Image: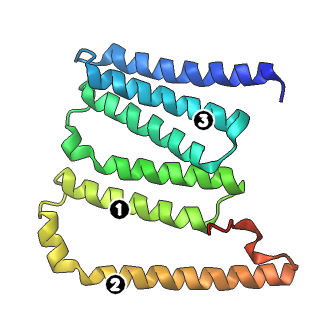
Amino acid sequence: MPKKYNTLLAVGISCIILGAILLVARFASANFSFISWVTVFAVLAGGLLLYLCATSIHRAWTIFLGCLLILNGFFIFIVKLGVLPVGMGQLWPFFVIFSSFSLFFSGIYKFKRIVAVYFVPSLVLVFLGVFFLQFSLHIIKVPIRYFAAMWWPLLFIFVGIGLLITFFYIQHTKKAVLESGEDFDDDYEDIS
């Protein structure tokens, strides 16, 4: 790809990040603190990782880390500036949700499509984040330890359902791949 397109990509990412930071800072009620500058740095580092992924590195981990730094950094920046009426102690489940988005996008980047290896863990992380958010924001009034002590057998039911879905998905995928004559394991890297 010509170098002028890489410059276009870098300037585009920088403008989006800078505009978002300045827009939030414009409407924020608090002054910039050290933690605000650290989060701005994290967002810029995430943008740099996304740029490097698009131009030279081409690895899924750079997408994951870049998205994670941008989402978490921007979120902490918003919370610390007082834009949201609640504190970080109540909003921590969003980090779990942002991790799931980052994992999902890195899976799409790596395989050029949605695959279960990335989609299912992403979906589980979203459900966990939303579940913990219900307790953190006191939507569910019962403390989570009492809820867990009462309903812990549901964990086995959900794990069993997940394993059955995975089993039937793999059976369906293997059958479709075998009928097409392609090798089933070509899409996955050996991590050993």
Q: Earlier in the sequence, mark 2 or mark 3?
A: 3
The kind of residue tagged 1 is: Leu
Image coordinates of residue 23 in percent, x first then y, are 41, 18
Image coordinates of residue 41 in percent, x first then y, are 42, 25
Q: Mark 2 near mark 3, Cβ–Cβ under 8 Å? A: no
Residue 128: mark: 1
Q: Earlier in the sequence, mark 3 or mark 1?
A: 3
Quadrant of the rendered image containing residue 153 = bottom left
Name which residue lies at 45% across and 37% down. Answer: 69
Q: Specify how the rendered protein is coloured.
A: rainbow
Q: Which of label 3 and label 1 is nearer to you?
A: 3
Name which residue lies at 38% across and 79% down. Answer: 158
Alpha-carbon neighbours of circle 3 within 10 Å: few (<14), some, or many (≥20)?
many
* Residue at which label 3 appears: 50
Q: Mark 1 near mark 2, Cβ–Cβ under 8 Å? A: no
Name which residue lies at 51% across and 85% down. Answer: 164
Image coordinates of residue 127 in percent, x first then y, are 38, 62
Image coordinates of residue 54 in percent, x first then y, are 69, 36
**Foreground of the two, 52 or 91:** 52
Which residue is outermost to the right? 181
Q: Earlier in the sequence, mark 1 or mark 2?
A: 1
* Residue at which label 2 appears: 156
Alpha-carbon neighbours of circle 2 within 10 Å: few (<14), some, or many (≥20)?
few
Name which residue lies at 36% across and 84% down. Answer: 157
